[in-house]
Image (tube, rainbow, N blue to C red):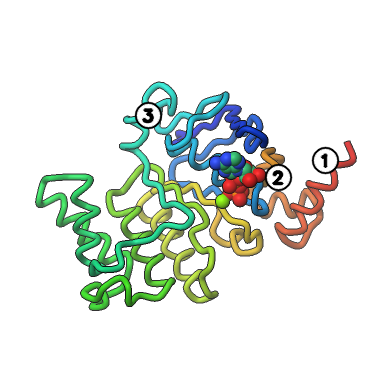
Amino acid sequence: MANVLEVKELSKQYSKVLAADKVSFEIAEGEIFALIGPNGAGKTTTIRMISTLLSPTAGDAVVAGHSILKAPAKVRECITYLPDEAGAYKQMTGIKYLRFMAGLFTTDIDKLNSYVDRAKQICGLGDRLNDKIGSYSRGMIRKLLLARAVMTKPKLAILDEPTSGLDVLNAIEIRKMIKRLAAEEGMSFLLSSHNMLEIEFVSDRVGIISKGHLMVTGRPEELKARYEAPNLENVFERVVKENEVH
Ligand SMILES: Nc1ncnc2c1ncn2[C@@H]1O[C@H](COP(=O)(O)OP(=O)(O)O)[C@@H](O)[C@H]1O
Ligand SMILES: [Mg+2]
């Protein structure tokens, strides 16, 4: 299967912190890949470089054949990015927001309507779309934002901490939405999460990142077996310990 993303020794040095140190991984078409690690590990930094919002200090990433360094505009056509702390316009109704966002992608009215219809279906908010976003719960806002992020069927959807701050039921629903889009529509996802237990259920493969180092990648089952760990949190613990020893 072709790779929709190839990350090649991507590094970012902030003035004091080396937030990403030669991070390399790939995502295949239709695959859900999650960067997992504690707060401050370098997930958002890595994601923002791939999303062409932050320039790397070194390295490159190739999205659907386009380099983030040489063809950032082409990359932007292939991806959508949902930031960590994304908000939506509180005074707008949900439906108005979807139409507004769709309008940023196309001026063709049929296309615009098809994007909005798709988002309406995906978010599952029904009549509540006619209410102002200011009246939505956190879970409803996340569903709206996720629907917005995937309505144009990007080759790669990049979602930074998509379920962070949600209750269990809303988090489960978001996970199901992501899994369904990958399975039924062949969309690829790059997710991040500091919740290693939760992410196991949505990801085909994960990469464990700590202090800017991507230490290991693999299928959750594979990693649990390799490190004789009952869950990914324990895998993380062992991987970190192992790296301290050497
Ligand atoms: N704009 C910035 N300037 C300086 N340091 C930053 C900046 N953004 C993040 N950092 C630092 O880089 C490291 C990685 O941060 P981040 O990528 O946000 O991690 P994560 O998303 O995994 O929580 C942290 O030590 C953080 O303090
Ligand atoms: Mg982050």
Q: Residue 183: percent from the left, percent from the top?
A: 42, 55
- Which residue is farthest front? 15
Q: Quadrant of the C terminus?
A: top right
> Disc 3 residue type?
Pro
Q: Residue 69: percent from the left, percent from the top?
A: 44, 24
Q: Please tell me which of labels 2 and 1 falls first in the chain.
A: 2
Q: How many angstroms separate mark 3 from mark 1 (CA)?
A: 35 Å
Foreground residue, 144 or 87? 87
Residue 154 against residue 96 in the figure, above or below: above
Is 18 on the left-hand or right-hand side of 98?
right
CB-based contact (under 8 Å), mark 2 and mark 1: yes
| Observer able to see residue 73 | yes
Q: How many angstroms separate mark 2 from mark 3 (CA)?
A: 27 Å
Is 111 on the left-hand or right-hand side of 246?
left
Label 3 neighbour load within 10 Å: few <14, some 14-19, many 20+: some
Name the residue at 59% across, 59% down.
199
- Numbered tag placed on residue 72 in the rendering: 3
CB-based contact (under 8 Å), mark 2 and mark 3: no
Q: Is the residue marked 2 within 8 Å of ligand 1, measured from its CB? A: no
Q: Which residue is mark 1?
A: 243
